[in-house]
Image (cartoon, rainbow, N blue to C red):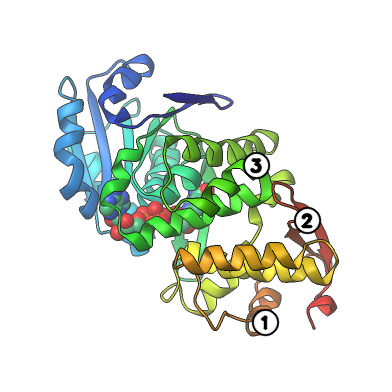
Amino acid sequence: MTFFRMQDYEIYIEENGLVNLYKHIKAIYHLDRVFVVTDQNVYNLYHEALERNLLELKVSFVVVEPGEKSKSLKTYQEVISKLIKLGIKRNHLLIAFGGGVVGDLTGFVAATLYRRLPYIQVPTTLLSMVDSSIGGKVGIDLPEGKNLIGSFYDPELVLIDPSFLKTLSRREYANGLAEMIKAGLIGDKKLYQHLLDHEDVTEAEITMAIQVKRDVVLLDPYDKVERMYLNFGHTFGHAIEKKHNYETYLHGEAVAYGMLIALQIGIKYNESKQELYDEVKKLLLERGLVKEPLLKMEDYIKEIITDKKFFDNELHFIVVPKVGTAKILRLKESDFQ
Ligand SMILES: NC(=O)c1ccc[n+]([C@@H]2O[C@H](COP(=O)([O-])OP(=O)(O)OC[C@H]3O[C@@H](n4cnc5c(N)ncnc54)[C@H](O)[C@@H]3O)[C@@H](O)[C@H]2O)c1
């Protein structure tokens, strides 16, 4: 078992760690009722296991539809209504039990219902283990765009149990791998090397990826400067997701194409090496994250310009000069023409 201390809470990473959830909850919470928000897939697969490990508590579930559409104002309101009907009070504990959708939605409910309730994160997808459950960003989407309403609101604890990954589809697994490859490229050569050689990840690699994000988040909890490094591959990644209406590509797939474009831009500005581009391309192809013919930068520049990513005609663009390091380039609109 590994644990990381964040500013005000702990992240526990442990294979089969679900068996210790009650113990961790008891250390921070003294009431006997908890309210679990989850999605239908995770509920079907794991509600019995969760209840078995929380036998001493009265557990109430609120179950939402799987998928991004549940990060909506409508579902937010439904979840709140159900929680109130179930008798939730301002000092009761909420548990976000699922992937990033459940984590972001439940965290936002926790941040706002009764002006804040304590909550914990129990992520069940690889992406939510290494990315969305860490860093306190919570929120929902609007018809106008993704993650437009939200807050920074830290959980009381995060429990990461990699054994949940056994039931994840290959595509969702690869989706999380993309964020791990990014973490390796910007901050941990050893992690990157492991991901080059192995398709499967264990507690050890999940821990390394979390450490990269944790270190950046501790430096910059409110996303002002250093967190920008986590955006490697995301400038074009977001443009790709948006242009295809968030339907064709999962986030990790879009970021995978985005990382290749960022490496190409790095090569253009003599920051990155062609050999690294070739190696990362081969890796992403092998993991099924990208396909040939690759998506082209030119097709997404318009999205980047219209998406207000430029401030004062300048875009902070992250490149990787060598594995384990990242750098900010300040690019102008004309640099993309
Ligand atoms: N808050 C942040 O900092 C942050 C960072 C990155 C992404 N996000 C958000 O995360 C969301 C994406 O998260 P995600 O990729 O986890 O998607 P998700 O929550 O939609 O989960 C993907 C699918 O996997 C299923 N699932 C979950 N756990 C499973 C398991 N153990 N076995 C089998 N199936 C399982 C879910 O039911 C769902 O169908 C997006 O909304 C994105 O905006 C947030």
Residue drawn 49% across the image and 62% down it: 252
Q: Which residue is drawn at 59% across and 49% down?
A: 192
| Dot 1 alpha-carbon crowd within 10 angstroms: few under 14, some 14 to 19, many 20 or more | few
Query: What residue does disc 3 label?
Result: 222
Considering depth in this image, is 90 or 51 the residue closer to the camera? 51
Residue 109 spot, x, y in % from top left: 39, 44
Residue 15 lies, with reference to residue 246, above or below; the image says: above
Between residue 308 and residue 288, name the one nearer to us: 288
Q: What residue type is labelled 3?
A: Tyr
Q: Which residue is drawn at 47% across and 40% down?
A: 206
Choose mark 2 or mark 3, whichever is in front. Answer: 2
Q: Nearer the viewer, residue 184 or 150?
A: 184
- Could you say which quadrant of the image residue 278 lies in? bottom right
Q: What residue type is labelled 2?
A: Pro
- Which of the two residues, 198 or 72, is positioned nearer the viewer here? 198
- Look at label 1 and name its amino acid: Lys
Q: Position of residue 82 (x, y in %)?
A: 22, 46
Horizontal and vertical percent position of residue 271: 82, 61
**Mark number, residue 321:** 2
Q: Are marks 3 and 1 in contact (CB under 8 Å)?
A: no
x, y (%) of residue 108?
43, 45
Q: In this view, does 332 lie above or below 175?
A: below
